[in-house]
């Protein structure tokens, strides 16, 4: 039995209005929930894309750092080989290294 009709089957216009208002509110609540869910999904997508972009940026930065490290190591090695102490040590050890190579070949 509807709220619009009582036990004596009399029509209650206020009950109809309450039912209509209730239905309208439930419909609006459903629409708001759907919109809110879509907004949350859009926010989650933005976060995922921002995270992806951050990872790409960090990967590029890592590549740049590796290239810079390789260059720095190469420059440090060249500078070391030009140092007088390294050159003297290489000169002194040259006969010993030659002897080791000759012994390995035999």
Image (cartoon, rainbow, N blue to C red):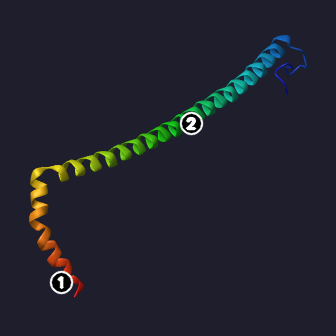
| Precedes in sequence: disc 2 or disc 1 | 2
Of 12 and 16, nearer the camera is 16
Of 7 and 79, nearer the camera is 79
Residue appearing at x 77%, y 19% in the figure: 24
| Quarter of the rendering occupied by the N terminus | top right
Give SS at disc 1.
helix
**Residue lying farthest to the top in this orientation:** 14
Residue position marked by numbered label 2 in the rendering: 49
Residue appearing at x 81%, y 18% in the figure: 20
101 shown above or below 8: below
Measuring from the top left, give residue 106's x and y in whole percent.
22, 88
**Residue lying farthest to the bottom in this orientation:** 106
Tell me if 50 is positioned left or right of 34 in this view: left
Q: Of the residues tagged 2 and 1, which is closer to the observer?
A: 1
Give SS at disc 2.
helix
Q: Marks 2 and 1, Cα distance to the nearest angstrom?
A: 63 Å
């Amino acid at each position: 039995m509807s709220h619009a009709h009582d036990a004596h089957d009399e029509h209650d216009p206020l009950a109809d209005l309450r039912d209509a208002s209730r239905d309208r509110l439930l419909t609006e609540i459903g629409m708001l929930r759907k919109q809110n869910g879509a907004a949350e999904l859009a926010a989650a997508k933005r976060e995922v894309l921002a995270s992806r972009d951050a990872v790409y940026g960090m990967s590029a930065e890592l590549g740049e750092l590796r290239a810079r490290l390789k260059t720095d190591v190469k420059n440090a090695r060249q500078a070391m080989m030009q140092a007088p102490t390294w050159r003297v040590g290489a000169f002194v050890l040259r006969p010993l290294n030659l002897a080791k190579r000759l012994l390995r070949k035999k």
